């Protein structure tokens, strides 16, 4: 999956997959915080900028 992201103009670090059980709530929270920090450091997605441009009709 990560190998496809550069082909569409996205940094592969914007995707992370985890396999956690329902009993791992505290670990899930840690992962969410770590991933949110990583995404913030990467800055806005290039897709966000592309969506801001007016569409040609």
Image (tube, grey):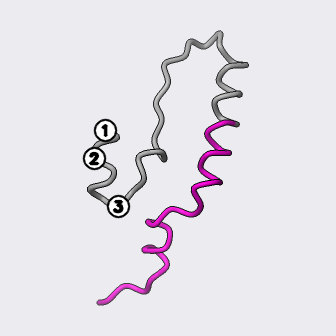
Residue sitting at x 47%, y 45%: 13
| Residue underneath mark 3 | 9
Q: Nearer the viewer, residue 30 or 6?
A: 6
Residue 53 is left or right of residue 41, and the answer is left
Percent across and percent down for residue 26 are 73, 19
Q: Residues within 10 Å of mark 3 (few under 14, many from 20)?
A: few
Within-10-Å neighbours for mark 1: few <14, some 14–19, many 20+: few
Residue visible at 57% across and 56% down? 42
Give SS at disc 2. loop
| Distance of label 3 from label 1 (alpha carbons) | 13 Å
**Is residue 54 shown above or below 41?**
below
Q: Position of residue 9 (x, y in %)?
A: 34, 61
Residue 49 located within the stretch drawn in magenta: yes
Task: Give the magenta-colored segment's residue range.
Answer: 34-57
Sequence-first tag of 3 and 1: 1
Task: Give the x, y percent position of residue 24.
Answer: 65, 13
Rendering coords of residue 41 (x, y %): 64, 54
3D distance between C-alphas at marks 3 and 2 = 9 Å
Dominant secondary structure of the residues highlighted in magenta in the image: helix
The disc label shown at residue 1, or none: 1
Q: Are marks 3 and 2 in contact (CB under 8 Å)?
A: no
């Amino acid at each position: 999956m990560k190998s496809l992201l550069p082909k569409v103009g996205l940094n592969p670090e914007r995707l992370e997959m985890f396999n956690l059980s329902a009993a791992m709530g505290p670990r899930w929270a840690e992962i969410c915080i770590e991933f949110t920090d990583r995404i913030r450091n990467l800055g806005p997605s290039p897709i966000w900028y592309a969506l801001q441009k007016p569409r040609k009709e």
